[in-house]
Image (spheres, rainbow, N blue to C red):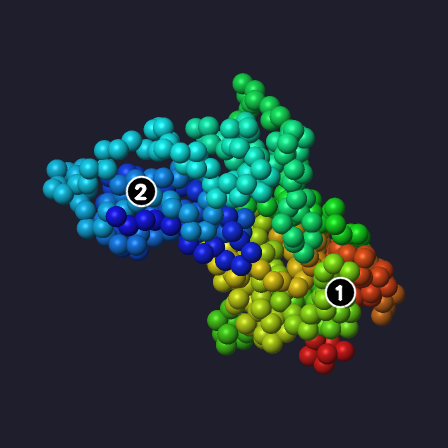
Amino acid sequence: MTQIVVPTLGESVSEATVAQWLKKEGEAVKADEPIVELETDKVTLEVNAPSDGVIVKIIVGEGQSVGVGAILGELEAGAVANDKGSKGAPKAVAAPAPAKSAPAEDDAKTSPAVRKLLADNNLDAAQVPASGKDGRLTKEDVESYLKGGAGKASPYAPPPAKSPAAPVPAPSKPREAGPREEKVKMTKLRQVIARRLKEAQNTAAMLTTFNEVDMGPVMELRNEYKEAFEKKHGVKLGFMSFFVKAVIQALREFPALNAEISGDEIIYKNYYDIGVAVSTPQGLVVPVLRDADTLSMAEIETKIIDLGTRARDGKLSLDEMVGGTYTITNGGVFGSLLSTPILNTPQSGILGMHAIQKRPVVDPKSGQVVAKPMMYLAQSYDHRIVDGREAVSSLVRIKQAIEDPQRLLLDV
């Protein structure tokens, strides 16, 4: 009998949720064929069959949390499914799913993360009301029980982290859905998005500074060279490569925006891993352009297209979404004219791009009022380590680089 186990999930990820079983008990599978989808707080990944055979037992049902190394199910290698009268079907195929049978022990109804939380707080599983599917105990059940002031339970202390984790805001007693309402459990990704956004508000002294930029020079440059650029590099010249280059130039001059707080120390980063926010059907993810300062504009455009496509298809690896030093988000693609971006903790800066709109402005050279393609920029920053002067000045540097692209070539 071969066990189907949870693989290593990546740096800083220790738990996943079973999102969907792609195969049922009794079904034949081929080696390396996807059999179950796991959802972490960053990506959705598939677990493949370790060999040819038949799924004889599903141990962890959909919606349940599991830790790295947990057993998801069992596969009998070399067995043949009997759905068409084939010989050699394993006896266990006819066994009912665990969710419908009485478990041999309490551990069958709890994930490794839940068992650890219970042990750390000297709790018995029977003490805590369970709200999970088929009466399973979830991590949220234990945390809610502890916060409610259980008699002999010790106060819950979360594991050490770079910054304190803020719980997802939710009512202590979830209400039932009304007759014209639908109740859907938040995905793991949506839960972590909610937690991280609230964490950023709770931990950082977040402020936002605004400016506007004349996009005319960049648009003229694109129009002049777009055909030659695409012919040579095989990719279209977009706006994002200009902004990535402009941001890096500003970060070099104002390094606090590329730093993070760790306890009572500041970690300055002498590299530029720029996160680019991408909207997907599952939620917002931020893949990272590694060492973006070493990339050409063509390489930046190519990587952004690749990362964006794979993000929307759920094909990004965990390593591609951790370790960013600064983030750029473009709400303008959805028509946003102005917004206040929230920091992607533990980063200290984020740039918000917005829609390009022709507006009447005074031309600084002629003094005449003319219609120009303008974009509002918003930079949110952590005021604990970034002063207002640095925040405002860095955004001005970005504006200057976009309005005079030659600055990017001359690094001035």
> Toward which corner of the image does residue 353 lie, by quadrant?
bottom right
Within 10 Å of disc 2 (Cα), the crowding (few <14, some 14-19, many 20+) is some
Q: List the residue tagged with mark 1.
A: 266
Q: Position of residue 404 (x, y in %)?
A: 74, 72
Left or right, 77 with reference to 352: left
- Res. 140 visible in picture: no
Q: Amino acid at mark 1?
A: Ile
Question: In this picture, is 220 found above or below 175?
Answer: below
Question: In this picture, is 353 found above or below 246?
Answer: above
Quadrant in which the C terminus is drawn: bottom right
Q: Amino acid at mark 2?
A: Lys
In the image, 201 versus 146, the foreground residue is: 146
Q: Total marks drawn?
A: 2
Which mark sits nearer the N-terminus, 2 or 1? 2
In the image, 166 versus 354, the foreground residue is: 166
Question: In this picture, is 268 found above or below 309?
Answer: below
Q: Position of residue 176 (x, y in %)?
A: 56, 22
Q: Secondary structure at mark 1?
A: strand
> Toward which corner of the image does residue 169 lie, by quadrant?
top right
Residue found farthest to the bottom: 410
Residue found farthest to the top: 179
Within 10 Å of disc 1 (Cα), the crowding (few <14, some 14-19, many 20+) is few
Q: Which label sits on residue 34? A: none
Q: Secondary structure at mark 2?
A: loop
Query: Which residue shows up at 69% across the image and 53% down it?
Result: 163
Q: Position of residue 192 (x, y in %)?
A: 59, 46
Query: Which residue shows up at 34% across the image and 28% down it?
Result: 101
Left or right, 388 with reference to 35: right
Query: Which residue shows up at 58% across the image and 68% down it?
Result: 290
Q: Are marks 2 and 1 in contact (CB under 8 Å)?
A: no
Q: Nearer the viewer, mark 2 or mark 1?
A: 1
Q: List the residue tagged with mark 2.
A: 23
